[in-house]
């Protein structure tokens, strides 16, 4: 029986999809297959702690019998302190399962304030049978003291004697299989197998995205519908997360200060005198916008008798929804004339929240400041595109409110306003080409004046509460301000403290500190002592005296700026050599490498970005990021940079190339996989030379 035409068409589509799937899995050329395997191997090595634990559990085991004996020299006791087995800490369950004769006891680190759990034996003739792995690390570590005795060890009938006496205190390792390579060989095999599965997983993910792209050719959604969906989804997530228990919630940085101060203003029956006194006590460098969400949430919570945090989560949820559901994709649409797909928006959101998930619930104002800063820039573009005054009102209000939350955006806002004025001047002089996105096609002379007035009125109106607070504190100005004694000292400003701290060698601050001797040497070689804080002039004098060192310092800060190792705002521990931090860093390095790849490859850059778009993001990033290269930084101050290289450069521009055959061809022909693998490895190398643990 012959197939009908439509059945043949469907079969042909299915065959094409299967062929695409097989092509993705085959990975193209042998060269690509090799590099995919190398990249997968690099990814698999990030799980080293899990691999090590797996190897220890699966290796063959022998029994090490320890018997307490007299020391051969200067006997003062017979104690034996065992603190590691197979180079790992001893658990109570391990100890209970061991065969023992005589007196042995388990002492936990918490109960006795030791560095490790230990097994302690005291009686001569006592013995304990310890299972150890038959590998080079198999054995025990023993703490030797003046009260230590001697021991005999027996492994498969081979008996050795050890004298544990030490007047000063020492450690010894007893490892019967120290020349065995079996664990090394097993580890290599495990990594190769793991790398194979990682490669298959990555290829399946790529195939899945290709399938989505083949079946959904045009993005269909309304921005504000998308914002509503993201808002509801994020809010429900926040509430459930809060009810389950968010790690370290409201305990990082200035969060408790903002929440506490907002709670004071939200009290029922608070008097005007109390409000004025509280306004006077607000740190001069913190604008009133920092306290608004906390105040509103607690004001409502106190009066309708609901948990104020449940009310508060409305603010970060809405901010998150507007940023990813409207502002970022709208900016992309303006430059490219088309919308991004919903899966790209989801990828941008998930990638950014991988680093900054604390912003979903954080009390700090960083996320609000970032969103308002980008909203101001978006509406500034719309002013040029449409000539409508309402966009001028919105842009001015967003920029001004941003500065009441994060004064670190002041240079960026001023720079953007100057750029807007320059573009207006270029328009009047006819210096812009007609196809330039910044052409004011709909703004005659009077229209420009009206828009400028609307922008300034909106901008200044938002400043009024801050002007009032500044007057109460004896200062005249539109914004939160810095002064001598603003924080910590009486002789220098907060900015000077930050720059002074950098010249003491501290590249970054919270959530973890990075000290660098080379940077500290700039201060020392310039003749400035550590026991006196430096003024801004002295800081720049020190930099000027060591120009090469200064350039190296800037490069270090530029790398440290994006070298995140923990989730922001929910930090519950420091950075240690542990699997999750290597994997965390590796994924971040992938984002950075891909963004670099798209900009360094001229042909791909021209395909992925418009000239006006590069100018836009360069201006937007310059103001907030550039000043950090001269002072000690904190990760949250570079949040706009993370958003760009993860959300925009990676998820929107690079990931969107899967729809375009020419872009995919350029990526394949530009050694993308070698570049990605090598740069991720280089980033790890640089990072491990900077951080000491």
Image (cartoon, rainbow, N blue to C red):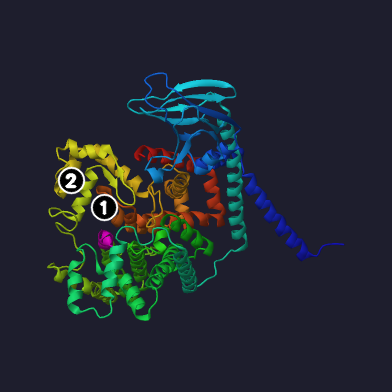
The quadrant in which residue 407 appears is bottom left
SS for dot 1: helix
Q: Mark 1 sits on what residue?
A: 627
Rendering coords of residue 35 (x, y %): 55, 39
Q: Mark 2 sits on what residue?
A: 539
> Going by the image, does 447 lie left or right of 206?
left
**Residue at the location (17% across, 58% down)?**
486
Magenta stretch: residue 411 in it? yes
Residue 246 can be seen, yes or no: yes
Residue 618 can be seen, yes or no: no
- For marks 1 and 2, give the CA distance: 14 Å
Nearer the observer: mark 1 or 2; the answer is 2
Vertical comparison of 143 with 475: above or below: above
Magenta stretch: residue 133 in it? no
The residue furthest top is 72
Pick the front one: 406 or 337: 406
Pick the front one: 390 or 176: 176
């Amino acid at each position: 029986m012959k197939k009908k035409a439509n059945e043949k068409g469907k079969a042909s589509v299915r065959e094409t999809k299967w062929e695409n799937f097989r092509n993705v899995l085959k990975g193209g050329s042998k060269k690509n297959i090799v590099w995919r395997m190398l990249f997968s191997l690099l990814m698999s090595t990030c799980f080293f702690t899990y691999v090590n634990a797996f190897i220890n559990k699966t290796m063959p085991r022998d029994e090490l019998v320890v018997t307490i004996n007299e020391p051969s020299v200067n006997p003062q006791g017979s104690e034996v302190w065992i603190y590691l087995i197979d180079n790992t800490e001893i658990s109570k369950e391990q100890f209970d399962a061991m065969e023992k004769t005589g007196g042995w006891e388990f002492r936990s680190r918490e109960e006795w304030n030791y560095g490790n759990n230990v097994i302690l034996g005291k009686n001569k003739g006592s013995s304990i049978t310890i299972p150890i792995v038959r590998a080079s690390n198999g054995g025990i570590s023993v703490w030797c003291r003046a009260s230590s005795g001697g021991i005999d060890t027996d492994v498969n009938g081979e008996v050795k004697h050890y004298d544990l006496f030490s007047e000063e205190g020492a450690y010894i390792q007893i490892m019967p299989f120290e020349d065995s390579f079996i664990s090394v060989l097993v580890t290599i095999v495990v990594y190769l197998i793991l790398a194979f599965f990682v490669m298959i997983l990555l290829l399946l993910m790529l195939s899945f995205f290709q399938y989505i792209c083949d079946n959904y050719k045009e993005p269909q959604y309304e921005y504000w519908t998308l914002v509503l969906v993201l808002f509801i989804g994020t809010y429900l997530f926040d509430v459930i997360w809060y009810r389950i228990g968010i790690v370290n919630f409201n305990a990082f940085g200035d969060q408790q200060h903002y929440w506490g101060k907002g709670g004071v203003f939200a009290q029922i029956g608070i008097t005007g005198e109390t409000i004025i006194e509280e306004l006077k006590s607000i740190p001069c460098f913190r604008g009133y916008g920092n306290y608004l969400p906390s105040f509103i949430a607690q004001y409502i919570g106190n009066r309708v008798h609901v948990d104020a945090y449940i009310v508060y989560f409305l603010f970060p949820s809405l901010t998150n929804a507007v940023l990813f559901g409207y502002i970022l994709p709208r900016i992309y649409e303006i430059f490219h004339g088309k919308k991004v797909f919903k899966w790209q928006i989801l990828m941008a959101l998930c990638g950014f929240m991988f680093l900054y998930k604390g912003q979903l619930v954080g009390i700090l104002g960083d996320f609000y400041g970032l969103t308002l800063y980008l909203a101001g820039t978006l509406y500034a573009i719309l002013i040029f595109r449409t000539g409508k005054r309402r966009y001028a009102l919105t842009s001015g209000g967003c920029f001004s409110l941003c500065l009441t939350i994060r004064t670190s955006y002041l240079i960026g806002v001023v720079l953007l306003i100057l750029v807007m004025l320059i573009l207006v001047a270029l328009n009047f002089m006819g210096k812009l080409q007609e196809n330039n996105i910044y052409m004011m096609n709909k703004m005659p002379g009077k229209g420009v004046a009206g828009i400028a007035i609307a922008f300034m009125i909106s901008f200044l109106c938002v400043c009024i509460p801050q002007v009032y607070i500044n007057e109460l504190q004896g200062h005249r100005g539109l914004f939160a301000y810095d002064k001598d004694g603003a924080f910590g000292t009486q002789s220098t400003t907060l900015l000077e403290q930050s720059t002074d701290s950098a010249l003491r060698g501290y590249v970054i601050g919270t959530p973890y500190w990075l000290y660098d001797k080379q940077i500290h040497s700039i201060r020392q070689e310039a003749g400035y002592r550590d026991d006196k804080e430096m003024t801004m002039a002295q800081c720049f004098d020190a930099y000027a005296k060591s120009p090469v060192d200064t350039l190296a310092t800037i490069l270090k800060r530029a790398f440290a700026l994006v070298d995140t190792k923990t989730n922001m705002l929910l930090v519950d521990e420091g950075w240690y050599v542990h699997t999750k931090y290597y994997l965390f860093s590796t994924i971040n390095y992938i984002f950075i490498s891909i963004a670099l790849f798209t900009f360094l490859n001229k042909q791909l850059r021209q395909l992925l970005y418009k000239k006006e778009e590069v100018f836009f993001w360069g201006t937007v990033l310059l103001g907030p990021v550039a000043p950090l290269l001269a002072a000690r930084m904190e990760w949250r101050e570079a949040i706009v940079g993370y958003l760009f290289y993860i959300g925009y450069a990676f998820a929107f521009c690079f990931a969107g190339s899967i729809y375009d055959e020419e872009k995919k061809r350029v990526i394949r022909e530009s050694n993308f996989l070698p570049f990605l693998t090598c740069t991720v490895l280089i980033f790890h190398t640089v990072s491990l030379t900077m951080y000491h643990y």
